[in-house]
Amino acid sequence: MAKIRELIEQAGGTAEEAVVAAKNRYLDQVRGVLRDLTRLKFTDRQGVMAHELAHAYTHVGLDSNSNRWEDGECDKGIVEGLAQFYTHKTAEALRDERGHDRVWIAHARLTDLQKANGATAYVNHLDWVKTISPEAMRQGLLDLRRGHIKREFEPFCEALNYLARRYPMKGERSL
Ligand SMILES: [Zn+2]
């Protein structure tokens, strides 16, 4: 809501003007991503697109109750961690499919680069994919959206570790 109010004030008052301002800002972001993409190799583009689509899954639009999640005040480690977690899981699932292994190759290569550059927000998921089941992450995402978990990195990790015991990896027993 704070974001919407801010946009309304910036746009000069009306809700319609705020919608136009929000659309323009969104289009600017899309243009920025597309500009960056054209500078990359084809395989890397696929990896980046998978990451951006994962952002769409975790942050954009409405939840099943038609509530919009404002992720503006969410820690960057959570926002990027969620995108990387779902990119990793999707790319991993495609890895053995003929012709689709390139998404995995690009994601692994880009993650290695981010690791080498010390971009921790983009590599935190490497621990999560080993210990946090997709069901635990799903519950974590729901709790985060609903405000049951603080939008700071450490409390989110603690909540994930708790959820991982309730919703363990396939084949493991719940505690
Ligand atoms: Zn991102």
Image (cartoon, rainbow, N blue to C red):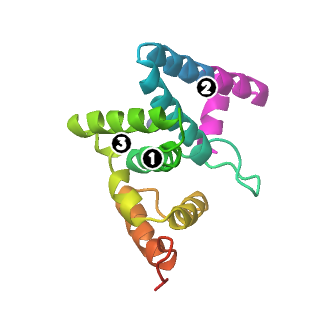
Residue mark closest to the camera, 2 vs 3: 3
Q: CA distance from mark 2 to mark 1?
A: 25 Å
| Residue underneath mark 2 | 26
Residue mark closest to the camera, 3 vs 1: 1
**Secondary structure that dominates the magenta span:** helix
Image: 25 above or below 76: above
Label 3, residues with CA under 10 Å away: few <14, some 14-19, many ≥20: many
Task: Confirm whether residue 72 shows in the render.
Answer: no
Q: CA distance from mark 2 to mark 3?
A: 22 Å
**Image location (x, y in percent) of residue 168:** 47, 74
**Image location (x, y in percent) of residue 111:** 33, 39
**Image location (x, y in percent) of residue 102:** 46, 32
| Residue underneath mark 1 | 88
Q: Residue furthest bottom?
A: 175
Label 1 sits on a secondary structure element that is helix
Is residue 21 on the magenta stretch?
Answer: yes
Magenta stretch bounds: 1-24
Image: 26 above or below 137: above
Label 2 sits on a secondary structure element that is helix
Residue mark closest to the camera, 2 vs 1: 1
| Residue underneath mark 3 | 122
Whether label 3 lies within 8 Å of ligand 1 gets the answer yes
Q: Residue at x 46, y 19 (%)?
A: 42
Label 2, residues with CA under 10 Å away: few <14, some 14-19, many ≥20: few
Q: Residue at x 67, y 24 (%)?
A: 23
Q: Residue at x 63, y 30 (%)?
A: 7
The image quadrant where one finds ligand 1 is top left
